[in-house]
Image (spheres, rainbow, N blue to C red):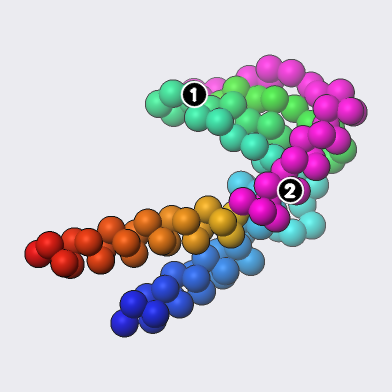
Amino acid sequence: MLLCTAGILFLAYWVTRKIGLSGGVGTAGAGSRMRVLDRLSIGAGQSLLVVQLGEQCFVLGVSKEQISLIAELSEEQSQLWKKAAAAHKADAAPAAFFETLSRKLHGRDNQNKGG
């Protein structure tokens, strides 16, 4: 049963990545020219985003009420963010998923033993 649950979770993760999250948050599809390279939550309903639009990259402040342009990144800075986002996408997403899965499974095992 544990293997079945792990398989279902992995399949759900894989399908989610293929359908919409692989190109970034809020993209129209794999061929989209706009994507979120990074997001940092700074408070309730507030975050900073590094967004790629075509070849340009921008730092945006986002709240429930508005979106503000904080900075337009230089070409060099844009290239660094794009490389970092590509490396993070390739390395961190599967590792984070399996780390979360492992924590959840171990937590459930501990709860089942105790009660």
Amino acid type, mark 1: Ile
Label 1 sits on residue: 42
Q: Viewer-proximal residue, 90 or 82? A: 90
Q: Residue furthest left?
A: 115
Quarter-of-image position of residue 104: bottom left
Query: What distance separates the C-alpha of mark 2 from that of mark 1?
Result: 24 Å
> Does residue 69 lie above or below 84 as drawn?
above
On-image quarter of the C terminus? bottom left
Residue that sits furthest to the right in the current view = 75
Query: Which circle marks residue 93 in the picture?
Result: none
At a point 16% along the width and 67% down the height, the residue shown is 113
* Relative horizontal placement of residue 24, taking residue 11 as reference (left or right): right
Q: Which residue is mark 2?
A: 87
Q: In front: 60, or 76?
A: 76
Give the amino acid at mark 2.
Answer: Ala
Q: Position of residue 77 (x, y in %)?
A: 83, 27
Q: From the viewer's perspective, is residue 15 above or below residue 26?
A: below
Counting from the top left corner in percent of width and height, residue 46 is at: 49, 25
Magenta span dominant secondary structure: helix
Q: Is residue 108 on the magenta stretch?
A: no
Specify the segment rendered in magenta: 63-92
Give the residue drawn at x 56%, y 56%: 95
* Quadrant, the N terminus: bottom left
